[in-house]
Image: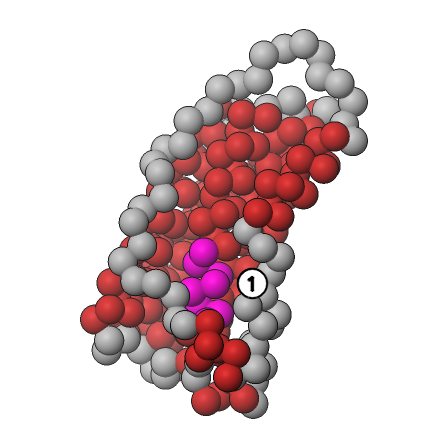
Amino acid sequence: MQRHNRRFVRLLQLAYSGELGAAIAYQGHAASVHDPVERQHILHIRAEELDHRACVGRILSQVGGRPDPLLELRNRCVGTSIAFFCHIGGWFAPMYGAGWIERVNIREYERAARLAALCGEPGFADELLFQAEVEWEHERYFRLKAAGHPIARLLKVWPAPAPKAAIRSSYAEFTRGLAPDTGQAPNPVRHCASRRATPQPAPSVDRVRRAGVGVS
């Protein structure tokens, strides 16, 4: 249990600082695009990343952890570098890179939810699964955006992740294999904020299918 607790705290620290880097990067990404609708959507995603940072910070505090100053500095520098690159890297590369990173984030929040369960904190797991679901929406937006660009015919976009419902169903399957709990009531957790209203739908599926990329 103690080993799981250490891993859980470390993953929370990584996620907390990672969301800082993401928010800085998306600020620069939004400023670099010319389409006002795209800019609004990227800023919307940035706001959700800041929501995630606030929620992860609260969970980190409740399990007795604190942010890692070195990770904070590192991710601030990484986010600033990406924000600068967005202004010189064209349209496609930032969209492609953002989608790839968001895909990784889905798995990381799913992993954090499983560690929460192993630590006897299923209430935290529910919040982390919710964040994985929001990251799934972010990945889909950027993936379909990148897939609609002519460069995607040369640089193939990764396959779509499993359907969003699989985030909860795979977690449920994982927890069925755990030993019965000790009878201790789970730590109740409320969402810090419900999903923000998306300002723009993702690109059309038909358009992406013409580009030869799978959709979920």
Q: Residue at x 75, y 18 (%)?
A: 180
Please, is residue 42 above or below residue 96 in the view? Answer: above
Camera sees residue 160? yes
Residue 43 x, y percent position in the rendering: 28, 59
Quadrant holding the N terminus:
top right
- Give the dominant element type of the magenta stretch: helix, strand or loop: helix
Q: Residue at x 44, y 68 (%)?
A: 142
Q: Nearer the viewer, residue 29 or 73?
A: 29
Pick out the residue farthest to the top: 183
Q: Is residue 139 part of the magenta span, yes or no?
A: yes
Amino acid marked by disc 1:
Ser
Magenta residues span 137-144
Pick out the residue farthest to the left: 36
Q: Secondary structure at mark 1?
A: loop
Write down the residue under mark 1: 216
Quadrant holding the C terminus:
bottom right
Q: Residue at x 24, y 63 (%)?
A: 40
Please, is residue 83 above or below residue 169 in the view? Answer: below
Left or right, 108 with reference to 56: right
Left or right, 160 with reference to 29: right
Camera sees residue 82? no
Residue 152 x, y percent position in the rendering: 51, 84
Q: Is residue 209 part of the magenta span, yes or no?
A: no
Res 90 quadrant in image:
bottom left
Please, is residue 215 above or below residue 69 in the view? Answer: below
